[in-house]
Amino acid sequence: MNNFTEPSRRDFLKTAIASGLLLGVSLPSPRDAKAAGNLHAPNAWVHIADDNSITLITARSEMGQGVYTALPMLLAEELGVDLASINVEVAPPNAKAYGNALVGGLQLTGGSTSVRDGWDRLRLAGAQVREMLASAAAARWKVTRDQVQPGNGFVTGPGGRKASFGELAAAAATLPLPEKPPLKDPKDFRIVGKRTRRLDTPSKVNGTARFGIDVKLPGMVYAALEQCPVIGGTVKTVDSAKAKSMPGVIDVVQIPDGVAVVADSWWRANQARKALVIEWDEGAGAALDHNSMLAGTRAALDSGTPKLFKANGDANAVIAASSRVVRAEYVSHLLSHAALEPMNFTAHYNNERVHLIGPTQWQDLTQTAVAKALGIKPEEVTLETTFLGGSFGRRQEVDFVVQAAQISKAVGKPVKLLWSREDDMTHDFYRPQAVHRVAAALGSDGKPAAMTFRMASQSVGIRVFGIPLKVQDPTMTESAVAPYEIAATRHDVVKHDAGLRVGYWRSVSNPLNVFANECFIDELAKETGQDPYAYRLSLLSNQPRFVQVLKLAAEKSGWGKPLPAGRARGIALMEAYGTYMAQVAEISLNDQGAVKVHRVTVAADLGRMVNPDTVEAQIQSSVIFGMGAALTQEITLDKGRVQQTNFHEFPVVRMNEVPAIDIVLVESTEAPGGIGEPATAVIMPALANAVAALTFKRVRKLPLTAEAIKMA
């Protein structure tokens, strides 16, 4: 997606020798089987300066998930240096150099891929650099490689010889990159797998961390953007005379997405924005409401063209012939990402070039989208990525970045565009609705002999990646196939465009599908009079990793032991992003009939862990995030207008509402799994199953509000 000119080896070495050792290290991938050591198309960069400072230029954005600590840990382990000695800088846009192999080579942070993608790449990077430095020292001292030892920023040799990495950097840069340097045996790890304090915490505590909202440039002005209250609507007419006369206003400019007021402070820009008189062409979106959207999605299950995802045997025939069939329909609702830092970006357009600074998950798309919008070449767009004040998928989108660039071009000044919370919540790319119909034929032993799973929802992939309507969208089918041993199954997915723009939301389609699957398996257990935990175990005889986390979660939660009156437990499990997880939620109802969560027990097997401390933090975060979506949050529309504008109408879980979260992490030698998202999905059916156990009512549509429980 980028224009990228491969440097010659001569040019590369000139740069490296001038500034220390800048090593590009690449690994083989399924898409590129060239031997590791290609200096021209690196996936990770290590910079060792003359002053012995070491910098990892990371291709992944930090949005709270801890990659500015986990990724340097991988590098430091093999390079043989203290973690504190490694600095982190964010890579510029260049998908060829910094692409994420787990998301098609895009320079994208998402899908719980950062550690999984970096596990081999960055360990190899450290090992390659270590060996080059050792070889440079051996050549300088005219000894063999086995007579020198790199570590702690130095190489030592016979007779007390010692040279810093920085001293050796220029010489090392002239050596060939070793293709297969020895990697540490995991049993010898001294950094990876150990609980480690996050490197970015001090800057966030003392206020020096740079988020997009903190950016300031010389001569910078501020913009507030009025967008159509109906997403997709456009300006018909605008009267900006009053706004232009207000204090501090510099200009009022119209861009495709609305009308921007530019002023010497954001407060003044936003106040003047209220004085704009705009007539909108609201477009087709003005007819939307969430109920009609849901009705259309439900109807698509009957009228839409299904795409078979997976089948085993003839499940339809088995169900048709069965005398004992259980059927259920589950509904998932619209959700906003609601990151605490509203959308913002700073752009400086000058002389056919634009410099961008701000929070993004997708660097190469940001570059190309802005270039296209401004009519310039991608290489004329430069980008600095700041910390992200939350994202959950929202900052994969680039609408707000393009807007900032367009406004800057119009006024000829550096511009910081800042959305209000209301802008953010009413102009999101929302988590889509979904309707699932699930059916099972039960055998004489109460186990499902056949199961059908049919889901209708909106495809984000059609918009983002141009996936054709008739082609399966893999981001719709995550966790669609439950792990249970069922002889005959059929899984169908129907793509239905409900009319509202939708986007990837934390854990993508996992929460949609696991809500249906894990609630349904609970319903089958109830139908057969069996314990939900024992029923699951009976269907997982060939799934040892699932069995382990299920048993651990049940044991840690006290499953089967008496609870105080008015409390109940619910259980659920799932595999996503290479992580196996089970959860038990313990709840009661308060005086208003709303769910109170007392305790959540999580057992997770995510293979090898880099930083268990961050793993636990991510699980806690995900549980709390999922609780809000399961219990209180919902986006609704009336005449195309989103009705929720701020957190009083889209409530996040407050500190006093956070339950005790008990976490059991499995020690594993399996490949690393992702942990930033799975717990968000599993908590939803765990809570729904707990509500059913407590009230004997099955709520099959989220959120699990007091009203929904009452009406079930």
Image (cartoon, rainbow, N blue to C red):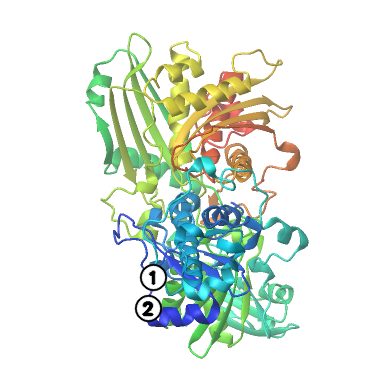
Residue 176 image point, x, y percent: 38, 69
Q: Name which of mark 2 and mark 1 comes first in the sequence.
A: 2
The crowding category of the residue bearing disc 2, from other C-alpha atoms within 10 Å (few below 14, some 14 to 19, many at least 20), is few
Location of residue 580 with respect to 335 vertically, above or below:
above
**Going by the image, does 465 lie left or right of 279?**
left
Relative depth, front residue between 558 and 459: 558
Residue 479 image point, x, y percent: 41, 37
Image quarter where the N terminus lies is bottom left
Relative depth, front residue between 64 and 692: 64
Location of residue 685 with respect to 692 vertically, above or below:
below
Labelled pair 2, 1 in contact (Cβ < 8 Å): yes
**Separation of residues labelled 2 and 1 (CA atoms):** 8 Å
From this viewpoint, is residue 232 visible? no
Relative depth, front residue between 215 and 564: 215
Residue 358 location, quadrant:
bottom right
Dot label at residue 9: 2
Local secondary structure at mark 2: helix
Residue 85 image point, x, y percent: 64, 61
x 61%, y 20%: residue: 694
From this viewpoint, is residue 73 visible? yes
**Going by the image, does 92 lie left or right of 418?**
left
Tag 1 residue: 39
Q: As shown in the figure, which amino acid type bears the numbered disc 1? A: Leu
Residue 477 image point, x, y percent: 37, 42
Residue 276 location, quadrant:
bottom right
x 55%, y 38%: residue: 679
